Amino acid sequence: MNPAVDEKSPGLNQYPIAPLYYLETLWFQVAGTLCNLLCSHCLVSANPTNRTHLMMTLEEVKRYLAESARLGVREYYFTGGEPFMNREILPILEETLKYGPANVLTNGTFIDDRLAARLKVLYDASRYSLELRISLDGTTEETNDPIRGVGSFKRILRGIQCLAKVGINPVITVTEAAPELGGLGKTGREQFYELIRSLGLRQPRMKVLSLFHIGEEESRSCGYKKNETLLGMHLTEDDLLKLQCTSSRMVTHEGAYVCPILVNDPGARMGDDIQSTLVPFRLDRGACYTCYEFGVTCRT
Amino acid sequence: MVTAETKMPAALRLESTFKKVGLLGGVYNNHVALEKACQMALSRGCETLFCLGDLGGFGPHPNKVFPILHKYRVQCIQGNYEESLIKRLADCGCGYTHPKDNYYAALSYDYTNSRLSDENRALLATFPQQLQFKLGSLVVHLCHGSPRRVNEFLWETTTADAFVSREVEKLEADILCCTHSGLHWKREVSPGKWIVNVGVLGRPANDGHTNVWYTELAPGGAQPSIEFVPVEYDWKKLVAEMQDEKLPAEFMETISSGWWTTCLEILPGKERMRGRF
C-alpha cells in the first residue's frame, strides 16, 4: 500500500499527493504479464513466461464492469501482456461494449483476416467505440525488430492491413525508442504516417509514448537518476488533473492498482476491488516523474 | 476520495421556467451563423437562447459576436476559451493531446486572444460556469465540456451511459447539455434521463455540408422534444473575412467544404471515419 500520509517515514510526506478526482478510465491487465513478444522497453516486462499477473477471466471482468458502472466509469482499456493471448478476449470485449467504449492495446501480431472480421462484427454491433491500438517501433524491419523482436515488423504490418481491409482504423502507438523519432522530429513522425497510409489507411492515426525507465527499459536506460523525482515539488490542481492516476485505475487478476504503469510495484496495489482504490496516492515513484514531466497519458 | 462533486463548479440556477429554448454551441467567432441561428430560433418559438461557451477561435473578428449576443439576449456560460481568455493564459485549454491538433489550436487562440477587446474580455468573466433551469417540469443542466471538466470531450461513441446517468443524478437534472466536441448527438441514458450535445455554430459537423447546427429543447410529451436544427448561412461572407484576416487556409476549407481539416486527432475512430480527412 501507499498511504497518502506516512507517519513512520516522514520523509515520504514530502512527495506530492495525487487525489482521485473522479474515476473516468478503468484499465484491465487482461492478459496479465504474458506476451508472445519480448520487447526491450516493456515497462511491465511481459514475455512468454512471465506469470507475475495471470490472465483475467470473463467472470472477473464482468464483476469489475458491474462495479465500474456503479462508479460512473466512462471508458475501458485493455492491455497486458498481449490481450489477444487471452482466449476469452472477444467475449470480454463484447461484454465491455455493453457498458462503454473499449480500447485494446495490442502488438497486432495475432490479428489475421479471421480475427479482424470478428472484431469488425463487435465494432459494428456496438454504439460505443472499439479502438485497436497497435504498437510499432520502427518504419522498417531494421529499426523495429531490434526493439520488438525478430520477424515482428512483418507480423505487425499484416495485423494493421487486416484491420484496414475490414474498415477499422487502428491507432499506431510508437514509443520514443523508435530510432526514427530520435532527432528527426516531424520528419520521423511523417515516416510513420507514410507507412501507415501505405497499408491502406487514408486517415493515419498515431500516438507517441514516452518511455518509463522501469521493467525491461530500466536495464536498457539504467533507470531513474536521483534528480528525476517529484520529491519536494508542489503540484497545482491543473498539474494533478493531467496525471492519469487522478482519473483512472487498473485492475488485474491479482487485484486493483493505482495505474497501468505500476502493476509490478507491490506498493501500488490498492486492494481487491475498485472501491478500495478510491483514495489518494503518493507520487514517490520514478515513473510518477515521467508522467508529470512529459505529460504522459496511456489513454489514446 | 476527493470526489467529482468537490471539483464541480457551482451552477447558476435560474428561477424562470421555459417552454422552449434554443441552445447554441461553440460559436468560434462565426458571427454570421450566430446571427442567423438567433433569428431562426426566435422565429421558431424559442423563448430564450443560451450559448454553451467558446465564443472565440477559428473564425474572424472576435469582437463581432458580442453585439449579436446582446441584441438577442443570449445567456452564456463559460467554455474553455473564455476561461483561458479571462486569465490571459498561453493556450486555449481545449484539451488536445496531439501535436497536430495543438498546432492549429494555438494559431486559432493566439488570433482571438490578441484581438479581443478589454471590454469584451471583462464581459466573459461575468458568465457563469454552468447553468440550470426548468423546462416545464424537467430540469436542464448546461455545461461546456462536461459537468466535471470544462474541456472534456463527450463524443457519442466514447461516453458511457453509466457515466452520464451518475452525473445527472448528482446534478438532480433530467437533461444534461454540452458542446465542446463539435458534433451534435443525443441519447436517453436511463429512463427519462438524457444527454444532448448541442453541436456548434462555429464550423460544420464534418459531414460535407456547409450548414452548422443548434438545438431546440421543449418538454414534449412522453419524451422531451430535442431537435437539431441545421443553419444555412452566408458562409462565403465568413470565408471572405477569414481571407482578409489571413487565417489558415485549412480553416477556410472546413467552412466552405463541410469537412474538418484540423484538430482531427482527438476524434474517436468511428467519428473520424465518417469524415473525409
Image: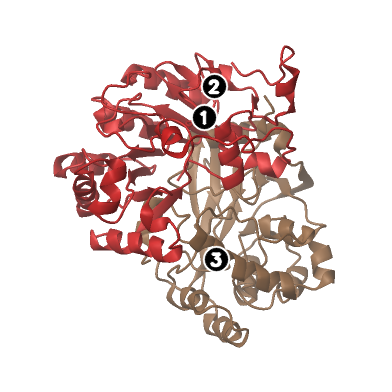
Chain colours: A red, B brown
In the drawing, does residue A187 fall left or right of residue A242?
Answer: left
The residue closer to the viewer here, B246 or A230, is: A230
Q: Which mark is residue A268?
A: 2
Marks 1 and 2 belong to one chain: yes
**Can I make out residue B137 in this image?**
no
- Give me the chain letter of mark 1: A
Residue at 52 percent across and 84 percent down: it is B236
Q: Tag 3: Cα neighbours inside 10 Å, few (<14), some, or many (≥20)?
A: few
Q: Amino acid at mark 1?
A: Cys
Marks 3 and 2 belong to one chain: no
Q: Amino acid at mark 2?
A: Ala
What residue sits right under mark 1 in the picture? A259
Q: Where, quadrant-wise, is the C terminus of chain B in this rendering?
A: bottom left
Q: Where, quadrant-wise, is the N terminus of chain B in this rendering?
A: top right
Quadrant housing residue A63: top left
**Can I make out residue A42 in this image?**
yes
The residue closer to the viewer here, B9 or B39, is: B9
What residue sits right under mark 3 in the picture? B103
Q: Tag 2: Cα neighbours inside 10 Å, few (<14), some, or many (≥20)?
A: many
Q: CA distance from mark 3 to mark 2?
A: 36 Å
